[in-house]
Image (tube, rainbow, N blue to C red):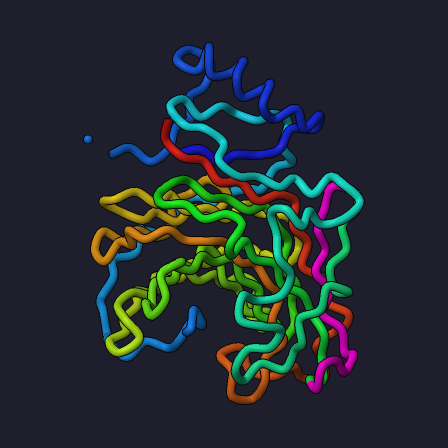
C-alpha cells in the first residue's frame, strides 16, 4: 500500500516519473497486494462486515518530504489547492442536489470555502444562512470527474466539537442506486474515532457495511485517509495503515467525489452542537488525489 504525500516542492509529476524508474530498488511501499436522487440514505439491511485488526503500534503522521511513485498507476485526478481560489473546472460547490440536506442545520455556501497557503479551508459558522442556523461548505465533482476503480486519498485535519461531521465520500453516477462509499467520516463529538462505510443496493433495498477504528485525536493534526477500490475488494487506510476491508458488494459503477463539513441537528446522525462546540470550526484539506491502473 502507498500513502501518497505531497512533496515540499509539489513537483508531483516530475517526482513520480523519476521515482517510477527506480521503484524496484528504491521504493519499498506498494499498494495492497492482490495474488436520490443521489442523496445518501440510512440502511435497512443488516450486513456483517469483517474489520481489519487494529495495528499493534500507533501510526504517526509525518510531514511529507517526497512524493513516492506508484508503478503501474497514473494520476487520474488531483487538486493540491495551490492557487488563490477553488478551481471550477474540477469542483462544484455545495451538494449535487442543493445546498441543504435532510435534518442537518447548515446551509452550504461558497463563502465558507477559502483557498490559500496550499490548503482549502471549509469553515462552519454560527451564521444563519438560507433559512438554516449555520453556514458551512461542501465541494463535489459531479458532472466534472468520475471514475471506476482506483486509489483515492485525502490529506486533511478535521474539527472537534459536538454536532460537527466531516466526510470524504463517493457517490454513484447512476440514478436510483444506493451506491455510496465513505472514505472517511468523523464526528466532532469523538474525533479520535473514524468510520469506513460502504452503502450498497437500491433505494428500495438498501444495505451497508460499517467499520470503525481509533487513533490519536484526528483534530490535532493532518492525517491521510485513503481507499483502494478494486473489482474484488475495498480497503481503507489511515496514515498508511489498513483499517478496514470489504470483499462483497463491491461497487462497479462510476463514482464522483464529495467532501464537506456538516453541522447536525437533533435528528441527524451527528447530533446537534452543544454549548462547548466552538465556532467558527475549520476543516482543512491539503490535497485530494485519485490514481488508476495504466
Answer with the quarter of the image where residue 293 lies: top left
Q: Is residue 33 above or below residue 24?
A: below
Task: Find residue 147 and report its horizontal and vertical position in percent.
Answer: 41, 45
Q: At 60% across and 84% down in the image, what residue appears?
A: 272
Q: Is residue 151 left or right of residue 166?
A: left
In reply to whether residue 125 is colored magenta, the answer given is yes
In reply to whether residue 72 is colored magenta, the answer given is no
* Between 47 and 102, the one nearer to me in the picture: 102
Q: Is residue 236 left or right of residue 158?
A: left
Q: Is residue 18 above or below residue 156?
A: above
Q: Locate the N terminus by quadrant.
A: top left
Q: At 54% across and 13% down in the image, what residue appears?
A: 18
Q: Locate the C terminus by quadrant.
A: top left
Task: Find residue 288 and report its horizontal and vertical position in percent.
Answer: 57, 44
- All told, the count of numbered labels is 0
Task: Find residue 200 and report its horizontal and vertical position in percent.
Answer: 29, 65
Task: Find residue 67 and report its horizontal and vertical position in percent.
Answer: 57, 26
Specify start and end residues of the magenta stretch as a single range: 118-131
Answer with the quarter of the image where residue 212 lies: bottom left
Q: At 25% across and 61% down in the image, what residue appears?
A: 49
> Which residue of the protein is positioned furthest toward the bottom in this rendering?
266
Q: Is residue 54 left or right of residue 232?
A: right
Answer with the quarter of the image where residue 132 lies: bottom right
Q: At 27% across and 71% down in the image, what residue appears?
A: 202
* Between 278 and 85, the one nearer to me in the picture: 85
Q: Is residue 228 above or below residue 208?
A: above
Q: Is residue 184 above or below residue 264?
A: above
Q: Is residue 156 left or right of residue 54?
A: right
Amino acid at each position: 500500500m502507498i500513502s501518497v504525500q505531497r512533496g515540499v516542492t509539489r513537483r508531483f509529476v516530475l517526482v513520480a516519473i523519476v521515482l517510477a524508474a527506480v521503484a524496484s530498488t528504491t521504493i519499498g511501499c506498494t499498494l495492497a497486494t492482490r495474488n436520490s436522487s443521489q442523496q445518501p440514505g440510512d440502511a435497512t439491511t443488516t450486513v456483517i462486515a469483517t474489520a481489519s485488526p487494529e495495528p499493534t503500534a500507533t501510526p504517526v503522521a509525518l510531514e511529507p518530504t517526497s512524493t513516492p511513485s506508484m508503478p503501474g498507476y497514473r494520476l487520474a485526478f488531483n487538486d493540491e489547492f495551490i492557487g488563490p481560489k477553488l478551481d471550477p473546472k474540477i469542483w462544484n460547490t455545495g451538494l449535487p442536489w442543493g445546498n441543504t440536506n435532510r435534518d442537518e442545520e447548515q446551509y452550504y455556501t461558497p463563502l465558507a470555502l477559502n483557498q490559500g497557503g496550499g490548503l482549502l479551508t471549509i469553515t462552519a459558522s454560527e451564521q444563519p444562512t438560507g433559512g438554516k442556523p449555520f453556514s458551512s461548505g461542501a465541494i463535489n465533482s459531479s458532472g466534472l470527474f468520475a471514475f471506476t476503480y482506483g486509489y483515492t486519498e485525502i490529506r486533511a485535519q478535521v474539527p472537534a466539537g459536538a454536532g460537527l461531521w466531516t466526510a470524504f465520500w463517493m457517490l454513484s453516477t447512476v440514478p436510483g442506486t444506493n451506491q455510496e462509499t465513505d472514505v472517511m467520516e468523523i464526528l466532532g463529538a469523538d474525533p479520535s474515532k473514524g468510520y469506513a462505510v460502504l452503502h450498497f443496493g437500491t433505494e428500495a433495498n438498501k444495505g451497508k457495511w460499517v467499520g470503525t477504528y481509533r487513533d490519536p485525536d484526528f483534530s490535532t493534526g493532518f492525517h491521510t485517509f485513503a481507499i483502494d477500490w478494486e473489482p474484488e475488494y475495498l480497503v481503507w487506510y489511515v496514515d498508511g495503515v489498513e483499517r478496514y476491508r470489504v470483499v462483497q458488494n463491491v461497487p462497479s459503477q462510476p463514482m464522483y467525489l464529495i467532501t464537506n463539513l456538516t453541522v447536525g441537528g437533533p435528528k441527524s446522525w451527528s447530533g446537534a452542537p452543544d454549548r462547548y462546540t466552538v465556532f467558527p470550526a475549520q476543516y482543512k484539506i491539503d490535497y485530494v488525489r485519485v490514481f488508476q491502473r495504466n
